Image (cartoon, rainbow, N blue to C red):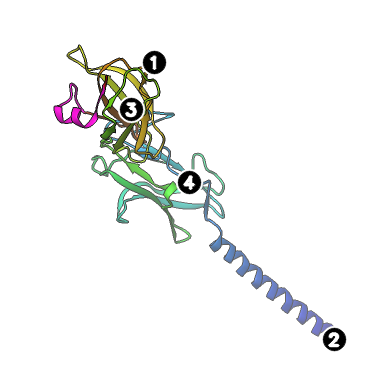
Amino acid sequence: MTTTRLSTGAFGVLVAATIAAFFVSQHLKVTTPLIQGAPRPVPGVINPLHPVRCGNYLSGSTTISFYLQHRSDDVDVYVVDAADEIVRTVASGRHMRKDERNPDGVFHWDGRLPDGRVAPDGTYYFRVALLHQGRTINLNEPQQTVKVKTVPPRPVVVGVSPAVIPSDSGSTRVTIRYAGNETRSATVLLYRMDGAAQPELVKTFVTGWNRQTTVWDGTIRGRPAPAGSYLVGVEVTDGACNTGRWPPQLPPSPAVLARAGVSVR
């Protein structure tokens, strides 16, 4: 009788432990990520309309990759816009083995809609549907999104101060205010306006990241700038290697010169 009670008790403990282990396992599957591999689109900014070599990548398309952590499954992968609307299916029913990232978990998007048109400029993210698990994962953290950007930056020089500097001092500081650099660095373009039908580019220098003011020290090639008239321009390149320049055309208009002209006397 005692043996039977012990056996029954041990069996009950075993059943309870099994049930507890099952719920712990299910809890872990719910609370730990279903996909791994730090998925993020590379590159993170694309221009399908005018793709170019941009750093180590072509700017016309993006690639995201990841692997399944808990079990194999079939997946659908979608591109979703900022309004949470699906704009493109990049994979349908693809089988992914557990812990296999390449080639199972590599997905490409060419930045286009199903009819071949380029997707509108904006921010997009990838949505992954695990078909047999009945779960959907949105890869929409800021570092997981991709931007379509076909319009170049539109930088502008807002003003320079002072507008007149002496030619006999190499320590003169000219403050340049600019905008439209989209939080990125800019390249200042200094043109000499005297003696030629087309302005001559005499100096360039890069500004700090995410700034809208910089300083020209009044020198060219390490020496005080010769007396004359100068124009301050600016150029900005975005993450898709689209480049915008101000002024958009040379020679500049009188209004541009009034805003960004510098005289050295």
C-beta proximity under 8 Å, tags 1 and 2: no
Q: Earlier in the sequence, mark 4 or mark 1?
A: 4
Alpha carbons under labels 4 and 2: distance apart: 58 Å
| Residue designated by label 4 | 39
Q: Earlier in the sequence, mark 1 or mark 2?
A: 2
In the rendered image, the quadrant that contains the N terminus is bottom right
C-beta proximity under 8 Å, tags 3 and 1: no
Alpha carbons under labels 3 and 1: distance apart: 15 Å
- Side of 26 where 73 appears, left or right: left
Alpha carbons under labels 1 and 2: distance apart: 100 Å
Region rendered in magenta: 248-263
Give the amino acid at mark 2: Thr
| Residue designated by label 1 | 221
Q: Earlier in the sequence, mark 4 or mark 2?
A: 2
Please tell me which residue lies in front, 259 or 112: 259
Please tell me which residue lies in front, 76 or 51: 51
Alpha carbons under labels 3 and 4: distance apart: 36 Å
Give the amino acid at mark 4: Pro
In the rendered image, the quadrant that contains the C terminus is top left
